[in-house]
Amino acid sequence: MPTKNVFELISQKKSSKLPVTLVLILAMAIVSGCSKTVYMMPAPAAISTGELDPFADTPEEEQSSNIMVGYATNRMPVGAKKSRFYTRDFDQDVRLGTATVRIGDGEKTWDEIREMSSKGVSKEEVILSMEQVEEVGVLEENDALDSLTPELQEVMEDFNRYIKKSRLKDVTVYVHGANNNFYRTAAQAAQYRHFTGRTAVVLLYSWPSAESIVRYGTDISNIKKSVPAFVRFLKLLAKHSVARKINILAYSAGSTLTTEALAVLGRDTSNPDRQAYKDSLRLGSIYFAAPDADFDEWVKQFQSYQDLVGRVTVTINQYDSVLAIAQEDHRARATQTWEKETSSKSRLGRPDLDDISNRDADWLVNLTKDSKFDVIDIDPSAIPGLGKGDHDFWYNSPWVSTDALLGINLDVGPAERGLAERTGEKGGSIWYFPADYEQRVAESLKDLNVKYERLRDEPL
């Protein structure tokens, strides 16, 4: 039986405040998911069990050890355009380009890569490395979006040709977490694309992380300062790409950047026709994975953009050790006079409903009954291989990575992708991974494969 979830209105005992220095020491002791080397993630369960073979449709030109993803960043660059390196410094310009990530030593054949991607590899067996980073255009802070420069026009034309060639006509934007460099985040985005059989069009948004666990506060500050740049990037995609939908996978602290940017769009009243405005943005699935965002602020922000987006998924591990440390850090900094904007409340990925008003709590619980808002309880005791305090489960758990890939790319509800439902004490709907998840998702894939064939054949 899965453990109960905070969305069921079970109060959690609030921990006492800890000094910032102690918080940082604890963080360095427990955060193992921030290694600077990226290894190939476990094969998603739908693939490793043999029920799904995404590589059957991989285009011939993609059949190599190199995975290419697009990127956008407001980090400052150094080096030549065809061999960029991005620093921790930043401004409000959005730099666009492509990153090529290599699997292993580059010597394996496509058949070998396909086999190890389907059967899985041992932990820390295959390293992903950066092969090339090429910047192709810049959207400067004061550039108009209505008429692009010739350089940006060419960039978007090339990008649109790529979308039209893909079997999935959507774009998925990956927004990474804290304490990450450009290489690590590009490798994460590349893995997401790889396990769709290289059919998904994936764009990394690399915000300027300070790349140090002891500078978590700096990361949060940089996120807030990067919101205008990220908003302009989303508007660029909406206005000048031919993507059917713009999906977002927001991981950890990337959820703060995502929700704050969506709130900016949601509070924009310049277009009185809300439906026309929604249609112009084309925002699709928003998947919050282990979200490190202020719970109370997220609720207010979500209320402003709920009507503009497609399916919204929030994954929760109430034992998440990284979010526990992040919460203590926020609470400690909230006591400082120079941190007036810091919330002392719980994180979205392990929320406490006592941190929001009764009215907002009722609204949120009722919303879980909506077919477009899903809360998933990540229960470490019920998911094979998942550690109790794990934070990186969206890519390190074969079950959760399967759910993310199916939910984002096919825009289907939890029941259609093999999850089970229970009702919370206040009547809310909570989804979880049942013991027979692999069998359930295998059955679901029979119908989902039909939907995938239909989607890929639909013209733009």
Image: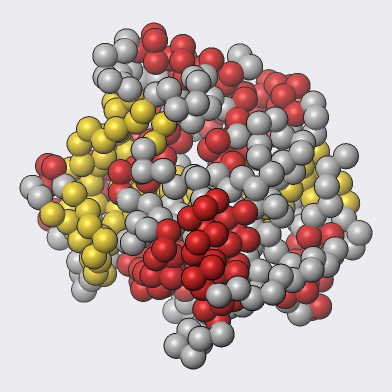
192 left or right of 156 in image? right
- Please name the residue shown 79% across and 68% down the image: 13
Examine the rendered structure and indicate whether residue 228 appears above or below residue 445. Answer: below
85 left or right of 218 in image? left
Picture quarter with the C terminus: top left
Q: Quadrant of residue 170?
A: top left
Point out residue 374 in the picture as x, y percentages from the top left corner: 70, 51
Which residue appears farthest toward the left when viewing the image? 80
- Please name the residue shown 33% across and 61% down the image: 210
Residue 238 visible in the current orientation: no
Examine the rendered structure and indicate whether residue 375 appears above or below residue 343. Answer: above
191 left or right of 252 in image? left
Point out residue 196 in the picture as x, y percentages from the top left corner: 47, 29
Point out residue 388 in the picture as x, y percentages from the top left corner: 69, 44
Point out residue 225 in the picture as x, y percentages from the top left corner: 36, 73
Looking at the picture, tell me which residue is in the foreground, 161 or 416. 416
328 left or right of 150 in image? right
Looking at the picture, tell me which residue is in the foreground, 61 or 19. 19
Picture quarter with the N terminus: top right
